[in-house]
Image (tube, grey):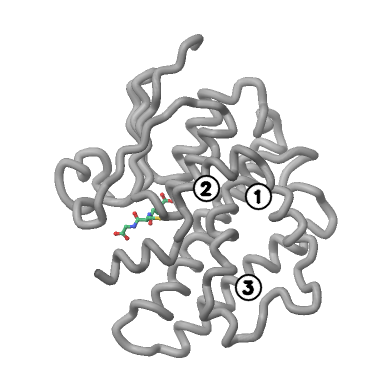
Amino acid sequence: MSIIKPLTLFSHGDTPNPTKVAIILKELSIPYKVAMIEWDNLHKEPFTNVTPNGRVPAIDDPNTGITLWESGAIIQYLIDTYDKEGKISYSSSPERYQQAQWLFFQTSGQGPYYGQAVWFHKHHPERLPTAEERYVREVERVIGVLDSWLQQHDYLVGDKVTYADLSFIPYAAAVPRMDFLNQYGKIFEGGKYAAYQAWLEKLLARDSVKKGIEPTAELIEGAANKIAK
Ligand SMILES: N[C@@H](CCC(=O)N[C@@H](CS)C(=O)NCC(=O)O)C(=O)O
């Protein structure tokens, strides 16, 4: 594939799951344009013709004719199609499967738990302290799992940055803005989770990450405000 036609990334701008995909697109220098879907238009046609789930991200790739949704599936497709050189991935075993393992942990563990922590603190119509606390504990547990691995390894898989590392960035970058976390005690006080913090800093310094993350200044907060409208 010599000249790549721009892909369409369906996004809502300042939300973490589309940002995850934008970071991978930037990393692999894949041209793309963003189709912004207003919050009120997510759950109706024509966007539900793109994804019956009515959520972002989704992509449309004119080079192969594929339309896809679910950030994890999109990332795996982009890697299989556009990372033949292995810039941010391994294609051999066991690393290939270890990458999938961390990506699945991100999409089933980090993303939903962080999202629910925001929901129960900021938008649920009644205070449910047990739910609020459960999801905060999960946010910290996910950070702990990553930190325990990173105490022994520079990266999640192998000896280079892969899409597995990159997939955690948008939600990890939102943690400092989740002000409600402070009522449970500061997560990073006293040098706690230092290996995780060093890893995150290293990732955030990457050019592609800075560019991919640009539209997400408000990240989770912005998305949640729009839900509340
Ligand atoms: N599992 C989905 C989650 C997608 C998702 O929840 N996206 C949010 C934005 S980050 C969304 O579209 N929310 C709209 C809504 O909740 O109605 C993925 O990984 O792509």
Residue 118 pos. (x, y %): 44, 73
Identify residue type, mark 1.
Answer: Leu
Q: Amino acid at mark 2?
A: Ile
| Element marked by disc 1 | helix
In the picture, residue 192 is in which quadrant?
Answer: bottom right
Residue placed most toward the observer, 88 or 9: 9
Residue at image mark 3: 140
Q: Secondary structure at mark 3?
A: helix
Residue 184 percent location from the top left of the image: 60, 86
> Is the residue indicated by label 2 positioned so its CB lies within 8 Å of ligand 1?
no
Q: How many marks?
A: 3
Q: Is residue 78 above or below residue 158?
A: above
Task: Tell which tag, 1 or 3, sits nearer the viewer.
Answer: 1
The residue located at (67%, 39%) in the rendering is 162
Nearer-N-terminus badge (2/3): 3
Q: In whole angstroms, how far apart are the C-alphas of marks 1 and 3?
A: 20 Å
Q: Which residue is mark 1?
A: 204
If you read the primary sequence from the N terminus, does the residue marked by circle 1 or circle 3 appear first? 3
User: Tag 2 or tag 1, which sits nearer the N-term?
Assistant: 1
Q: Residue at x 65, y 50 (%)?
A: 204
**In this rendering, is residue 33 above or below 107?**
above
Q: CA distance from mark 1 to mark 2?
A: 9 Å
CB at disc 3 and ligand 1 closer than 8 Å? no
Relative depth, front residue between 31 and 75: 31
Which residue appears at 43% of the width and 80% of the height?
121
Which amino acid, by three-letter code, is at mark 3? Glu
Within 10 Å of disc 1 (Cα), the crowding (few <14, some 14-19, many 20+) is: some
Residue placed at 55% from the left, 26% from the top?
29
The residue pinned by badge 2 equals 213
Kindly report the distance in space between the C-alpha atoms of the residues bearing marks 2 and 3: 23 Å
Q: Are marks 1 and 2 in contact (CB under 8 Å)?
A: yes
